[in-house]
Amino acid sequence: MRLTQRTNLALRALMFCAVNDGRIVRKQDVAERCNVSENHLAQVINGLARTGFITTLRGRHGGFRLSRPMEQINIGHVAREFEGGVPLAECFAAGRNECPLASACRLRDALARAVAAFYATLDELTLADMVECNEGLEQILALPEALPRCNRALAAAG
């Protein structure tokens, strides 16, 4: 199984927002830190907003942020939203299956189980699981003014 580039970018953008939680982030910052094209990222941001994972703000100080707490954003749900409609193999493409083995092939059922297991694994994870106390990720994605997440958690608890 391989994630599409759109899903990969969606997860990167969400992790960027989570690392910089509570702040409005700019597309330019995400593109720079995640090494992606702003144009491609813009399409992904639109998809994230359309599916309710982020809220966008227009204007001079515009950008986007998570629309709900990172603990409530399920990685499996994100993957399904962005992978939906992309068939794993030709035999999964409704109306376009021209595989001559389709009537006798047992691989399709095995692949369907593998995809279900893949999503079941992602369903166990939230965005918070990806970013909380992940200092390496924070070093890469945190905006300069941001206090590291582990330090914020410790400060709030103390």
Image: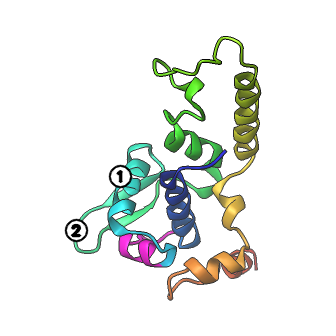
Q: Position of residue 43 (x, y in %)?
A: 35, 54
Q: Is residue 88 above or below residue 53?
A: above
The circle on residue 38 is none
Q: CA distance from mark 1 to mark 2?
A: 16 Å
Dot 1: element: helix
Q: Position of residue 40 (x, y in %)?
A: 37, 60
Tell me the amino acid under the disc marked 1: Asn
> Residue 154 falls in which quadrant of the image?
bottom right
> Residue 36 falls in which quadrant of the image?
bottom left
Q: Nearer the viewer, mark 1 or mark 2?
A: 1
The residue singled out by tag 1 in the image is: 46
Left or right placement of residue 113 versus residue 152 in this view = right
Does residue 25 belong to the magenta stretch?
yes
Q: How many residues crowd around disc 1 within 10 Å: few (fewer than 14), some, or many (20 or more)? A: some
The residue singled out by tag 2 in the image is: 59
Dot 2: element: loop
Q: Residue at x 70, y 46 (%)?
A: 122
Q: How is the image coloured?
A: rainbow
